[in-house]
């Protein structure tokens, strides 16, 4: 049986992954880091890390 804590943890992980997918999509469409941060709630520092990964 899956505990309530496990379910909540999995949902939180899925939300984070979805948020990063959204950031990646906006980066590919040349949104500015500031716009992405405002829309997604992800810090500019984290966005810059994602951008560096995508350009490799």
Image (cartoon, grey):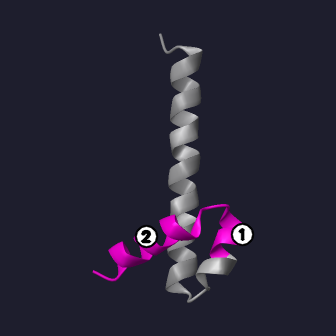
Taking the spot 52% from the left edge, 81% from the top edge, the residue there is 27
Residue at image position (55%, 56%) is 18
Q: Is residue 51 above or below residue 19?
A: below
Residue 19 image offset from top left, x and y in percent: 58, 58
Relative to 9, say whether 43 is above or below: below
Marking on residue 24: none
Provide residue 49's location: percent of width, then percent of height. Answer: 41, 69
> Which residue is the site of mark 2?
50
25 is higher (above) or lower (below) than 43? below
Mark 2 crowd level (few <14, some 14–19, many ≥20, 10 Å Cα): some
The residue stretch that appears in magenta: 36-56
Q: Quadrant of the C terminus?
A: bottom left
Quarter of image, res 11: top right
Q: x, y (%) of residue 9? A: 53, 30
Number of disc labels: 2
Which residue bears the numbered disc 1?
39
| 2 or 1: tag closer to the N-terminus | 1
Q: CA distance from mark 2 to mark 1?
A: 16 Å
Q: Residue at x 56, y 19 (%)?
A: 5
Q: Main secondary structure of the magenta part?
A: helix
Was residue 53 drawn as part of the magenta stretch in this picture? Answer: yes
Above or below: residue 28 compared with residue 8? below
| Residue 3, position as x, y percentages in the image | 53, 13
Q: Residue furthest top?
A: 1
Callout 2: helix, strand or loop? helix
- CB contact under 8 Å: marks 2 and 1: no
Q: Residue at x 69, y 79 (%)?
A: 35
Classify mark 1: helix, strand or loop.
Answer: helix
Quadrant in the picture for residue 42: bottom right
């Amino acid at each position: 049986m899956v505990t309530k804590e496990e379910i909540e943890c999995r949902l939180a992980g899925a939300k984070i992954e979805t948020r990063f997918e959204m950031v990646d999509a906006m980066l590919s469409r040349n949104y500015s880091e500031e716009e992405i941060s405002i829309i997604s709630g992800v810090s500019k520092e984290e966005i810059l890390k994602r951008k560096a990964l995508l350009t490799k």
